[in-house]
Amino acid sequence: CSATVAGALMYLRVSDGIFFEVGGTSTNIGVIRNGKPTIRFAEIGGHRTYVNSLDIRVLGIAGGSMVRSDGKEIVDVGPRSAHIAGLPYSAFARPEDLVEPQLIFLKPKPEDPTDFAAVRVPSGKTYAITNTCAANALGIVKPEHYSYGNAEAARRAIEPLARHMGISLEETARRILDKATDKIIPVIETLVTEYQLDRDQVVLVGGGGGAAALIPHTAQRLGLEYKISQ
């Protein structure tokens, strides 16, 4: 997370913004105000210390978060990820690897519900449907982004879920990203209020491998500018 802040300050010249370190399973969120990261006393086990640290909020949503569906709606995205489930992202497969994909529902861990969506191909290999897959299917992720995968492969994986839900592939992908960013937007609103940021000047700064899977869609929903750091 410190690396993302450094990148935002040194290379993107961000003065006021909210930065995101987006991994595969979780996202760290903090604030840059007047060109400096915000600091507070760290809390350990619910006890406030006198050790200064970056003010970071952690969410269980990221680029690899898996999709949950009841067959009619996207009921949740995450907190389980493809990494935890030990599955490859469909967006990072080749289109020829996703011929005749069949929708299945599984539980990544024994204690999880059985509504995490994935696809299985005739060879028996299973691929996860993630935020990164949805963003690639919609063409949101650009070639220069770390999250860039194969849009056709992602679309092939999402298509069986779309048919199951009775809606278009594009609408399915949008609902996935909407459900995921529903978890991020309240944190942004809280930080804007807490640190009295000028909303017209706020920039969302995405760092980490999964940044492009979530930050552009979040920014679009809020009408804010965004930047993806290298």
Image (cartoon, rainbow, N blue to C red):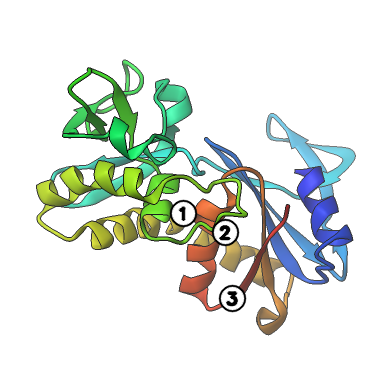
Residue visible at 78% across and 71% down in the picture: 16
User: Residue most toward the front?
Assistant: 96
Query: How many angstroms separate mark 1 from mark 2 (CA)?
Result: 7 Å
Residue visible at 33% across and 49% down in the picture: 152
Marks 3 and 2, the one that precedes in the sequence: 2
Residue 174 in the image, given as x and y percentages of width and height: 33, 61
Tell which tag, 1 or 3, sits nearer the viewer.
Answer: 3
State the SS at label 2.
Answer: helix
- Name the residue beneath numbered marker 2: 187
Among the 4 quarters of the image, the one containing residue 156: top left
Mark 1: amino acid: Lys
Q: Nearer the viewer, residue 73 or 95?
A: 95
The relative height of residue 22 versus residue 112 in the rendered view (above or below) is: below
Which label is found at residue 127? none
Q: Nearer the viewer, residue 194 or 29?
A: 29
Among the 4 quarters of the image, the one containing residue 34: bottom right
Is 228 on the left-hand or right-hand side of 91? right
Residue 9 in the image, given as x and y percentages of width and height: 86, 60
Q: Are marks 1 and 2 in contact (CB under 8 Å)?
A: yes
Mark 3: amino acid: Leu
Residue visible at 80% across and 64% down in the picture: 12
- Name the residue beneath numbered marker 3: 224
Is 3 on the left-hand or right-hand side of 225? right
Q: Nearer the viewer, residue 133 or 1?
A: 133
Tell which tag, 3 or 2, sits nearer the viewer.
Answer: 3
- Name the residue beneath numbered marker 1: 183
Among the 4 quarters of the image, the one containing residue 93: top left
